[in-house]
Image (cartoon, rainbow, N blue to C red):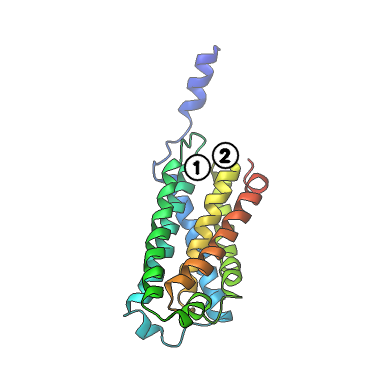
Amino acid sequence: MTTDDLIAQLSGTVAPVSRRAVGERLARGLLLGAIVSAAVMAAGLGLRPDLGAAIHGSIFWMKAAYTMSLAALALTATRQLARPDAGSIRWLWLATLPVLLLAVVGVADLSGAPSSAWLALWLGKSWRICPWLILALSVPVFLGLLWSFRSLAPTRLRATGATAGLASGAFAATIYCLHCPEASAMFVLTWYSLGILLATAIGALLGPRLLRW
C-alpha cells in the first residue's frame, strides 16, 4: 500500500464536520457556564429588588450593552482561536470602541454634576467588591468554555486563554447587572472593566496550562 492509498483510506472513513461545529460547541459550554453563574448570583447575591422597573430604563441597558458588546467580540475571537489555523485577531481592537463610548457617557455625566458628587459617581457604594464579584461569577463561564475546548484544537494557547477570560468576564458582568443597582457610567467603566480585565489576565495565565492538547 502506498502512502497516498493509506491517506485516501483513512480519510474516507472520517465523517465530515459541520462548519458551525466550533461555534456550537463553544455556545454549549458558554450556556452551561452562564446558567451556573446566574444560579450562583441569584442564590448568593439575589436580583436587585427594582429589576422590573430598571429594565425599562436606559441605565440598565447602557450597562448591558457595554458588557454584551465586549462579550460578543471576545467570543468571536475565541471561536477563531479555537482552530489551529486561527489567523490574525488584530481586529479585536474593536473592543476599545465600547470602552471609548462609555467613557464619553461617563465624562458627560460628570460634566453635568457638581464636582462634589464626582467621587460618589465614580466609587458608588460597592466599588470594593464589584470587580471581585464579577471575577467570581466568571469562573463557571470560563470552566464551561474549557469544557468546550476539550474537542477543539487551539494552538495559540495564551491568546486563546485571554480571549476566553475576556468573554467569561464580560458575560459574568452582564449577569451581575441583574444584581447591581449602580447607575453611574464612570462606575461601570472603572469597576466592571477591572473585573473583566482580571478575568482576562487569569485566562491568559492559565491558557498555556489548561488548553494543551
Q: Residue furthest bottom?
A: 49
The residue positioned farthest toward the front in the image shown: 115
Q: Residue at x 53, y 19 (%)?
A: 6
**Residue occupied by mark 1:** 81
**Relative side of 210 to 111, left or right:** right
Q: Are marks 1 and 2 in contact (CB under 8 Å)?
A: yes
Q: Residues within 10 Å of mark 2 (few under 14, many from 20)?
A: some
Q: In terms of secondary structure, where does tag 2 sit?
A: loop
Q: Residues within 10 Å of mark 1 (few under 14, many from 20)?
A: many
The image position of residue 18, as x and y in percent, is 40, 41
Tell me residue 42's x, y (percent).
Answer: 52, 79
Query: Looking at the picture, which amino acid does disc 1 mark?
Result: Leu
> Which quadrant is home to the C terminus?
top right
Question: Is 147 left, or right, of 56 in this rendering?
Answer: right
Q: Position of residue 76 (x, y in %)?
A: 43, 49
Q: Is residue 181 visible?
A: no
